[in-house]
Image: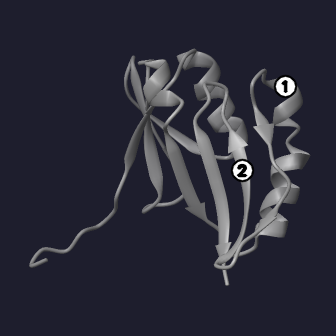
Amino acid sequence: MNYHPKSIRTFIGAENYELSRTFYRELGFEEHVIDPKMSYFKVNDLLGFYLQDYYVKAWINNSMIFLEVDNVDQCAAELMAKDLHRKYINVRFSEIHNNDWGREIFMHDPSGVLWHFGQFN
C-alpha cells in the first residue's frame, strides 16, 4: 500500500436500535451520533464500529467482531461485573476458551452479533 491506513471499522445492525445503543454505552463504548439511524461507537481514537438501525437476521446471525485485549481475564471479569446478561435478553457470555493461538471469551449482543474478546499468546 502506498497510502497510510488509519483505522478499519465494521458496520453492524440492530434488531432494536435504541436497546443496542444503550447496551453498547453500558458495555463501555463512547457513542457519536451520526444521524437518527446510525452511530459510531469507539473505545479509543482507532477502535470502533458503526451501529445502524437496520436488521437482516441472516446478516446479523453471521456477523462477528474480534476485539483484541491485553488481558482476557481482566476483560472477562469486567464484562461479568456489568451484569449485562441479566439486564438484556439474548445477551450471553461464554467461559474463557483456551486456544493454540491464545485465549478468548465470546459475547452475543442483544441482536445476536457475536463478539470475540481475545488475547494472543
The x and y percentages for residue 6 are 29, 67
Label drawn at residue 23: none
- Quadrant of the rendering where the N terminus is positioned: bottom left
Number of marks drawn:
2
Disc 2 element: strand
The amino acid type, in three-letter code, at marker 1 is: Lys
Give me the C-alpha separation between circle 2 and circle 1: 17 Å
Disc 1 element: helix
Query: Which residue is farthest front?
Result: 100
Marks 2 & 1, CB-CB < 8 Å contact: no
Q: Quadrant of residue 75?
A: bottom right
The x and y percentages for residue 16 are 57, 15
Give the labeled residue for mark 1: 87
The amino acid type, in three-letter code, at marker 2 is: Phe
Relative height, residue 103 to residue 96 (above, below)? below
Give the labeled residue for mark 2: 106
Relative height, residue 23 to residue 73 (above, below)? above
Query: Which residue is pictured at 44% across the width and 61% down the height?
Result: 45
Q: Quadrant of residue 56?
A: top left
